[in-house]
Image: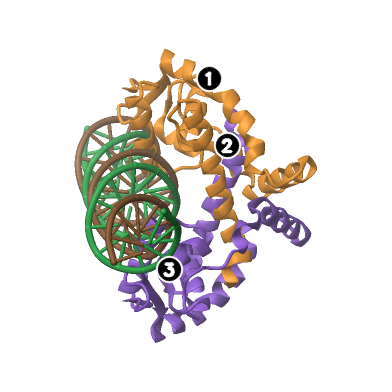
Chain colours: A purple, B orange, C green, D brown
Amino acid sequence: MKARGMAGHLIRRLNQISTQVFSKHMHNAGLDLTPVQFAAMDAIITHPGIDQASVAALIAYDRATIGGVIDRLEHKGYVRREVSKRDRRAREVRVTGKGAEAFEQILPIVTALQDEVLNGLDETERETFLKLAHKAVGSEDDMEPSSHVE
Amino acid sequence: MKARGMAGHLIRRLNQISTQVFSKHMHNAGLDLTPVQFAAMDAIITHPGIDQASVAALIAYDRATIGGVIDRLEHKGYVRREVSKRDRRAREVRVTGKGAEAFEQILPIVTALQDEVLNGLDETERETFLKLAHKAVGSEDDMEPSSHVE
DNA sequence: CGGATATAATAACTATACTTACTATTCTCG
DNA sequence: CGAGAATAGTAAGTATAGTTATTATATCCG
Protein backbone atom coordinates (compact mmCIF):
# COMPACT_ATOMS: atom_id res chain seq x y z
CA MET A 1 0.00 0.00 0.00
CA LYS A 2 2.36 2.68 -1.21
CA ALA A 3 -0.54 4.89 -2.19
CA ARG A 4 -1.85 5.46 1.32
CA GLY A 5 0.48 8.24 2.44
CA MET A 6 0.35 10.11 -0.84
CA ALA A 7 -1.04 13.62 -1.11
CA GLY A 8 -3.70 12.61 -3.61
CA HIS A 9 -5.03 9.83 -1.42
CA LEU A 10 -5.15 11.98 1.72
CA ILE A 11 -6.90 14.77 -0.14
CA ARG A 12 -9.46 12.38 -1.59
CA ARG A 13 -10.16 11.04 1.91
CA LEU A 14 -10.53 14.55 3.31
CA ASN A 15 -12.99 15.38 0.56
CA GLN A 16 -14.93 12.24 1.34
CA ILE A 17 -15.11 13.11 5.05
CA SER A 18 -16.07 16.69 4.25
CA THR A 19 -18.91 15.58 2.00
CA GLN A 20 -20.17 13.07 4.54
CA VAL A 21 -20.19 15.61 7.38
CA PHE A 22 -22.07 18.05 5.15
CA SER A 23 -24.67 15.46 4.14
CA LYS A 24 -25.16 14.31 7.70
CA HIS A 25 -25.89 17.80 9.01
CA MET A 26 -28.19 18.65 6.09
CA HIS A 27 -30.10 15.44 6.66
CA ASN A 28 -30.35 16.08 10.41
CA ALA A 29 -31.83 19.50 9.65
CA GLY A 30 -34.36 17.90 7.33
CA LEU A 31 -32.77 19.61 4.34
CA ASP A 32 -31.60 18.31 1.02
CA LEU A 33 -28.68 20.27 -0.39
CA THR A 34 -25.26 19.09 -1.53
CA PRO A 35 -22.00 20.99 -0.93
CA VAL A 36 -21.92 22.05 -4.57
CA GLN A 37 -25.51 23.24 -4.50
CA PHE A 38 -24.68 25.27 -1.39
CA ALA A 39 -21.65 26.86 -3.06
CA ALA A 40 -23.73 27.69 -6.13
CA MET A 41 -26.49 29.25 -3.99
CA ASP A 42 -23.86 31.32 -2.20
CA ALA A 43 -22.48 32.60 -5.51
CA ILE A 44 -25.94 33.35 -6.89
CA ILE A 45 -27.01 35.26 -3.77
CA THR A 46 -23.82 37.32 -3.76
CA HIS A 47 -24.15 38.07 -7.48
CA PRO A 48 -27.84 38.39 -8.38
CA GLY A 49 -28.53 37.91 -12.08
CA ILE A 50 -25.21 36.14 -12.63
CA ASP A 51 -25.02 33.86 -15.66
CA GLN A 52 -24.25 30.14 -15.38
CA ALA A 53 -20.74 30.31 -16.80
CA SER A 54 -19.81 32.93 -14.19
CA VAL A 55 -21.21 30.77 -11.40
CA ALA A 56 -19.01 27.98 -12.70
CA ALA A 57 -15.96 30.26 -12.79
CA LEU A 58 -16.61 31.55 -9.26
CA ILE A 59 -16.75 28.14 -7.63
CA ALA A 60 -14.31 26.45 -10.02
CA TYR A 61 -16.64 24.17 -11.91
CA ASP A 62 -16.99 23.57 -15.57
CA ARG A 63 -19.93 24.86 -17.57
CA ALA A 64 -21.35 21.43 -18.28
CA THR A 65 -21.62 20.41 -14.63
CA ILE A 66 -23.09 23.65 -13.37
CA GLY A 67 -26.09 23.32 -15.68
CA GLY A 68 -27.24 20.18 -13.87
CA VAL A 69 -26.58 21.72 -10.44
CA ILE A 70 -28.72 24.75 -11.27
CA ASP A 71 -31.36 22.46 -12.78
CA ARG A 72 -31.71 20.74 -9.43
CA LEU A 73 -31.79 24.03 -7.52
CA GLU A 74 -34.52 25.19 -9.90
CA HIS A 75 -36.55 22.01 -9.31
CA LYS A 76 -36.32 22.61 -5.55
CA GLY A 77 -37.73 26.09 -6.23
CA TYR A 78 -34.61 27.80 -4.85
CA VAL A 79 -33.53 29.67 -7.97
CA ARG A 80 -35.07 30.84 -11.21
CA ARG A 81 -33.53 31.31 -14.63
CA GLU A 82 -34.37 33.68 -17.42
CA VAL A 83 -32.83 34.46 -20.75
CA SER A 84 -30.73 37.60 -20.53
CA LYS A 85 -32.00 40.55 -22.52
CA ARG A 86 -28.45 41.70 -23.15
CA ASP A 87 -27.20 38.35 -24.41
CA ARG A 88 -29.74 35.83 -25.54
CA ARG A 89 -27.22 32.97 -25.19
CA ALA A 90 -27.00 33.56 -21.45
CA ARG A 91 -29.39 32.65 -18.63
CA GLU A 92 -29.57 35.04 -15.69
CA VAL A 93 -29.94 33.19 -12.40
CA ARG A 94 -31.50 34.59 -9.24
CA VAL A 95 -32.62 33.06 -5.93
CA THR A 96 -36.32 32.93 -5.16
CA GLY A 97 -37.84 33.99 -1.84
CA LYS A 98 -37.96 30.34 -0.88
CA GLY A 99 -34.30 29.95 -1.85
CA ALA A 100 -33.21 32.97 0.18
CA GLU A 101 -35.15 31.67 3.16
CA ALA A 102 -33.59 28.22 2.88
CA PHE A 103 -30.12 29.74 2.58
CA GLU A 104 -30.64 31.75 5.78
CA GLN A 105 -31.45 28.52 7.54
CA ILE A 106 -28.57 26.60 6.00
CA LEU A 107 -25.72 29.09 6.35
CA PRO A 108 -25.32 28.83 10.15
CA ILE A 109 -25.44 25.03 9.91
CA VAL A 110 -22.70 24.97 7.30
CA THR A 111 -20.60 27.47 9.23
CA ALA A 112 -20.92 25.38 12.37
CA LEU A 113 -19.98 22.15 10.63
CA GLN A 114 -16.64 23.39 9.31
CA ASP A 115 -14.70 22.43 12.42
CA GLU A 116 -16.12 18.93 12.39
CA VAL A 117 -14.54 18.29 9.00
CA LEU A 118 -11.12 18.71 10.61
CA ASN A 119 -12.17 17.01 13.81
CA GLY A 120 -8.84 15.30 14.43
CA LEU A 121 -7.05 18.64 14.62
CA ASP A 122 -6.94 21.15 17.45
CA GLU A 123 -7.66 24.83 16.90
CA THR A 124 -4.08 25.82 16.06
CA GLU A 125 -3.58 22.91 13.69
CA ARG A 126 -6.87 23.66 12.00
CA GLU A 127 -5.78 27.23 11.34
CA THR A 128 -2.44 26.10 9.98
CA PHE A 129 -4.11 23.53 7.76
CA LEU A 130 -6.59 26.04 6.34
CA LYS A 131 -3.86 28.59 5.75
CA LEU A 132 -1.76 26.05 3.86
CA ALA A 133 -4.76 24.72 1.95
CA HIS A 134 -5.61 28.24 0.88
CA LYS A 135 -2.05 28.83 -0.26
CA ALA A 136 -1.91 25.52 -2.13
CA VAL A 137 -5.16 26.20 -3.95
CA GLY A 138 -3.58 29.45 -5.04
CA SER A 139 -4.89 32.69 -6.32
CA GLU A 140 -7.21 31.31 -8.99
CA ASP A 141 -10.12 31.74 -6.61
CA ASP A 142 -9.74 35.50 -6.42
CA MET A 143 -11.37 36.36 -9.72
CA GLU A 144 -14.77 37.94 -10.19
CA PRO A 145 -17.36 36.88 -12.75
CA SER A 146 -16.96 39.00 -15.85
CA SER A 147 -20.44 39.41 -17.21
CA HIS A 148 -23.48 40.11 -15.13
CA VAL A 149 -25.54 43.01 -13.89
CA GLU A 150 -25.24 43.82 -10.20
CA MET B 1 -19.16 34.41 -1.38
CA LYS B 2 -19.03 33.21 2.18
CA ALA B 3 -18.35 29.66 1.03
CA ARG B 4 -14.95 30.36 -0.50
CA GLY B 5 -12.82 30.25 2.64
CA MET B 6 -14.57 27.28 4.12
CA ALA B 7 -12.78 24.01 4.77
CA GLY B 8 -15.12 22.04 2.53
CA HIS B 9 -14.59 24.33 -0.42
CA LEU B 10 -10.80 24.38 -0.08
CA ILE B 11 -10.69 20.60 0.23
CA ARG B 12 -12.87 20.17 -2.84
CA ARG B 13 -10.56 22.47 -4.81
CA LEU B 14 -7.48 20.56 -3.64
CA ASN B 15 -9.10 17.32 -4.75
CA GLN B 16 -9.87 18.85 -8.11
CA ILE B 17 -6.26 20.01 -8.57
CA SER B 18 -4.93 16.64 -7.43
CA THR B 19 -7.11 14.77 -9.92
CA GLN B 20 -6.14 17.11 -12.76
CA VAL B 21 -2.40 16.77 -12.06
CA PHE B 22 -2.78 12.99 -11.98
CA SER B 23 -4.71 12.89 -15.26
CA LYS B 24 -2.25 15.20 -16.97
CA HIS B 25 0.77 13.06 -16.08
CA MET B 26 -0.96 9.82 -17.00
CA HIS B 27 -1.97 11.29 -20.33
CA ASN B 28 1.56 12.58 -20.98
CA ALA B 29 2.89 9.08 -20.34
CA GLY B 30 0.38 7.67 -22.82
CA LEU B 31 -1.43 5.86 -20.02
CA ASP B 32 -5.04 5.70 -19.02
CA LEU B 33 -5.53 5.21 -15.30
CA THR B 34 -7.50 7.25 -12.78
CA PRO B 35 -6.35 7.97 -9.21
CA VAL B 36 -8.88 5.47 -7.90
CA GLN B 37 -7.80 2.79 -10.33
CA PHE B 38 -4.19 3.38 -9.23
CA ALA B 39 -5.12 3.06 -5.55
CA ALA B 40 -7.04 -0.15 -6.27
CA MET B 41 -4.10 -1.62 -8.22
CA ASP B 42 -1.80 -0.77 -5.33
CA ALA B 43 -4.07 -2.55 -2.86
CA ILE B 44 -4.46 -5.60 -5.12
CA ILE B 45 -0.71 -5.92 -5.68
CA THR B 46 0.02 -5.65 -1.97
CA HIS B 47 -2.71 -8.19 -1.13
CA PRO B 48 -2.89 -10.82 -3.88
CA GLY B 49 -6.18 -12.69 -3.96
CA ILE B 50 -7.96 -9.99 -1.97
CA ASP B 51 -11.75 -9.81 -2.35
CA GLN B 52 -13.51 -6.71 -3.65
CA ALA B 53 -15.03 -5.70 -0.32
CA SER B 54 -11.56 -5.70 1.27
CA VAL B 55 -10.16 -3.57 -1.55
CA ALA B 56 -12.98 -1.13 -0.85
CA ALA B 57 -12.20 -1.14 2.87
CA LEU B 58 -8.47 -0.60 2.26
CA ILE B 59 -8.86 2.46 0.10
CA ALA B 60 -12.03 3.74 1.80
CA TYR B 61 -14.56 3.15 -0.93
CA ASP B 62 -17.93 1.58 -0.80
CA ARG B 63 -18.57 -1.85 -2.23
CA ALA B 64 -20.87 -0.61 -4.98
CA THR B 65 -18.30 1.76 -6.49
CA ILE B 66 -15.34 -0.61 -6.34
CA GLY B 67 -17.13 -3.14 -8.56
CA GLY B 68 -17.11 -0.68 -11.45
CA VAL B 69 -13.48 0.30 -10.82
CA ILE B 70 -12.36 -3.33 -10.93
CA ASP B 71 -14.52 -3.92 -14.00
CA ARG B 72 -12.55 -1.25 -15.82
CA LEU B 73 -9.21 -2.61 -14.62
CA GLU B 74 -10.30 -6.03 -15.86
CA HIS B 75 -11.22 -4.62 -19.28
CA LYS B 76 -7.77 -3.04 -19.53
CA GLY B 77 -6.36 -6.50 -18.83
CA TYR B 78 -4.65 -5.34 -15.62
CA VAL B 79 -6.43 -7.62 -13.14
CA ARG B 80 -8.38 -10.86 -13.21
CA ARG B 81 -11.21 -12.05 -10.99
CA GLU B 82 -12.24 -15.52 -9.96
CA VAL B 83 -14.84 -16.89 -7.62
CA SER B 84 -13.27 -17.81 -4.30
CA LYS B 85 -13.22 -21.50 -3.46
CA ARG B 86 -13.59 -20.73 0.22
CA ASP B 87 -16.56 -18.40 -0.21
CA ARG B 88 -18.50 -18.57 -3.42
CA ARG B 89 -19.98 -15.10 -2.81
CA ALA B 90 -16.55 -13.52 -3.05
CA ARG B 91 -14.36 -12.76 -6.08
CA GLU B 92 -10.62 -13.05 -5.58
CA VAL B 93 -8.76 -10.33 -7.48
CA ARG B 94 -5.17 -10.56 -8.72
CA VAL B 95 -3.05 -8.45 -11.06
CA THR B 96 -2.04 -9.95 -14.39
CA GLY B 97 1.49 -9.81 -15.80
CA LYS B 98 0.41 -6.88 -17.92
CA GLY B 99 -1.02 -5.17 -14.85
CA ALA B 100 2.14 -5.65 -12.81
CA GLU B 101 4.20 -4.29 -15.70
CA ALA B 102 1.97 -1.24 -16.07
CA PHE B 103 2.12 -0.59 -12.33
CA GLU B 104 5.93 -0.66 -12.40
CA GLN B 105 5.81 2.01 -15.06
CA ILE B 106 3.17 4.09 -13.30
CA LEU B 107 4.46 4.08 -9.73
CA PRO B 108 7.47 6.37 -10.29
CA ILE B 109 5.30 8.79 -12.26
CA VAL B 110 2.75 8.97 -9.48
CA THR B 111 5.45 9.35 -6.83
CA ALA B 112 7.03 12.17 -8.79
CA LEU B 113 3.76 14.02 -9.28
CA GLN B 114 2.90 14.27 -5.58
CA ASP B 115 4.80 17.51 -5.04
CA GLU B 116 3.11 19.16 -7.98
CA VAL B 117 -0.27 18.73 -6.29
CA LEU B 118 0.94 21.04 -3.52
CA ASN B 119 2.84 23.25 -5.90
CA GLY B 120 2.08 26.49 -4.07
CA LEU B 121 3.81 25.24 -0.92
CA ASP B 122 7.51 24.98 -0.15
CA GLU B 123 9.06 21.79 1.19
CA THR B 124 8.47 22.59 4.88
CA GLU B 125 4.88 23.68 4.30
CA ARG B 126 4.23 20.57 2.25
CA GLU B 127 5.43 18.37 5.08
CA THR B 128 3.29 20.23 7.60
CA PHE B 129 0.28 20.00 5.35
CA LEU B 130 0.68 16.25 4.81
CA LYS B 131 1.22 15.65 8.51
CA LEU B 132 -1.96 17.56 9.39
CA ALA B 133 -3.93 15.93 6.56
CA HIS B 134 -2.88 12.53 7.83
CA LYS B 135 -3.93 13.42 11.34
CA ALA B 136 -7.27 14.84 10.16
CA VAL B 137 -8.06 11.74 8.14
CA GLY B 138 -7.46 9.79 11.32
CA SER B 139 -6.68 6.23 12.08
CA GLU B 140 -9.41 4.64 10.00
CA ASP B 141 -6.87 3.99 7.27
CA ASP B 142 -4.78 1.67 9.42
CA MET B 143 -6.95 -1.41 9.19
CA GLU B 144 -6.14 -4.54 7.21
CA PRO B 145 -8.56 -6.47 5.05
CA SER B 146 -10.09 -9.25 7.07
CA SER B 147 -10.65 -12.06 4.63
CA HIS B 148 -8.22 -13.11 1.98
CA VAL B 149 -5.42 -15.58 1.43
CA GLU B 150 -1.93 -14.13 1.34
C1' DC C 1 -31.00 -29.32 11.59
C1' DG C 2 -33.08 -25.04 10.09
C1' DG C 3 -34.53 -20.34 10.38
C1' DA C 4 -32.67 -15.66 11.30
C1' DT C 5 -28.86 -12.94 10.41
C1' DA C 6 -24.90 -11.35 8.11
C1' DT C 7 -22.06 -10.72 4.11
C1' DA C 8 -20.27 -10.31 -1.12
C1' DA C 9 -21.49 -8.67 -5.12
C1' DT C 10 -24.55 -6.51 -8.39
C1' DA C 11 -28.23 -3.47 -10.00
C1' DA C 12 -30.65 0.79 -10.19
C1' DC C 13 -30.77 5.54 -9.08
C1' DT C 14 -28.95 10.23 -7.98
C1' DA C 15 -25.30 13.71 -8.06
C1' DT C 16 -20.94 15.26 -9.09
C1' DA C 17 -17.02 16.17 -12.51
C1' DC C 18 -14.86 16.39 -16.80
C1' DT C 19 -14.43 15.86 -22.09
C1' DT C 20 -15.84 16.61 -26.69
C1' DA C 21 -19.21 18.02 -29.87
C1' DC C 22 -23.01 20.90 -31.26
C1' DT C 23 -26.31 24.92 -31.56
C1' DA C 24 -27.36 29.60 -31.00
C1' DT C 25 -25.61 34.04 -30.52
C1' DT C 26 -22.45 37.68 -30.17
C1' DC C 27 -18.25 39.94 -31.06
C1' DT C 28 -14.27 41.33 -33.81
C1' DC C 29 -11.85 42.86 -37.34
C1' DG C 30 -10.58 43.34 -42.05
C1' DC D 1 -20.96 45.06 -43.33
C1' DG D 2 -19.94 40.25 -43.08
C1' DA D 3 -17.07 36.11 -42.26
C1' DG D 4 -14.65 33.87 -38.75
C1' DA D 5 -13.59 33.60 -33.88
C1' DA D 6 -15.39 33.42 -29.40
C1' DT D 7 -18.86 32.46 -25.93
C1' DA D 8 -23.26 30.46 -23.36
C1' DG D 9 -25.56 26.63 -22.83
C1' DT D 10 -26.85 21.78 -23.76
C1' DA D 11 -26.07 16.94 -24.93
C1' DA D 12 -23.74 12.61 -24.77
C1' DG D 13 -20.27 9.72 -22.88
C1' DT D 14 -17.11 8.12 -19.06
C1' DA D 15 -15.75 7.72 -14.19
C1' DT D 16 -16.36 8.48 -9.53
C1' DA D 17 -19.20 8.23 -5.10
C1' DG D 18 -22.87 7.14 -2.51
C1' DT D 19 -27.80 4.98 -1.30
C1' DT D 20 -31.07 1.32 -1.22
C1' DA D 21 -32.68 -3.12 -2.82
C1' DT D 22 -31.87 -7.79 -4.43
C1' DT D 23 -29.61 -12.24 -4.96
C1' DA D 24 -26.63 -15.78 -3.54
C1' DT D 25 -24.20 -17.76 -0.06
C1' DA D 26 -22.38 -18.36 4.79
C1' DT D 27 -22.72 -18.45 9.48
C1' DC D 28 -24.78 -18.53 13.91
C1' DC D 29 -27.71 -20.08 17.26
C1' DG D 30 -31.62 -22.19 19.39
Mark 1–mark 3 CB contact (< 8 Å)? no
Q: Nearer the viewer, mark 1 or mark 3?
A: 1
Q: Is residue B37 left or right of residue A130?
A: left
- Counting from the top left corner in percent of width and height, residue B10 is at 60, 57
Q: Earlier in the sequence, mark 2 or mark 1?
A: 1
Q: CA distance from mark 1 to mark 3?
A: 42 Å
| Amino acid at the residue labelled 1 | Gln
Q: Indicate the secondary structure of the residue bearing disc 1.
A: helix
What is the total number of numbered labels drawn onto the structure image? 3
- Residue C14 sits in quarter: bottom left
Secondary element at tag 3: loop
Q: Secondary structure at mark 2?
A: loop
D11 shown above or below B23: below
Left or right for C26, reference A42:
left
- Category of crowding for the residue at label 3, using alpha-carbon neighbours closer than 10 angstroms: few (below 14), some (14–19), many (at least 20): some
Q: CA distance from mark 2 to mark 1?
A: 28 Å
Q: Is residue A114 left or right of residue A32?
A: right
Circle 2 crowding by C-alpha within 10 Å: few under 14, some 14–19, many from 20: few
The disc placed on residue A33 is: 3
- Estimate the spatial distance between the alpha carbons at disc 3 and disc 2, rounded to whole Å: 32 Å
> Residue tagged by mark 2?
B143
Q: Disc 2 residue type?
A: Met
Left or right: A30 in relation to B3: left
Expressed as whole percent of the image width and height from the top left, the position of residue B26 reads 50, 31
Residue D13 rendering spot, x and y as whole percentages: 27, 42
Q: Which of these two is toward me, A100 or A54?
A: A54
Q: Residue at x 40, y 24 (%)?
A: B93
Q: Which of the 4 quarters of the picture holds residue C25? A: bottom left
Quarter of the figure that contains the N terminus of chain B: bottom right
Q: Chain of mark 1?
A: B
Check disc 1 and report the residue beneath it. B105
Both on one chain, marks 3 and 2? no
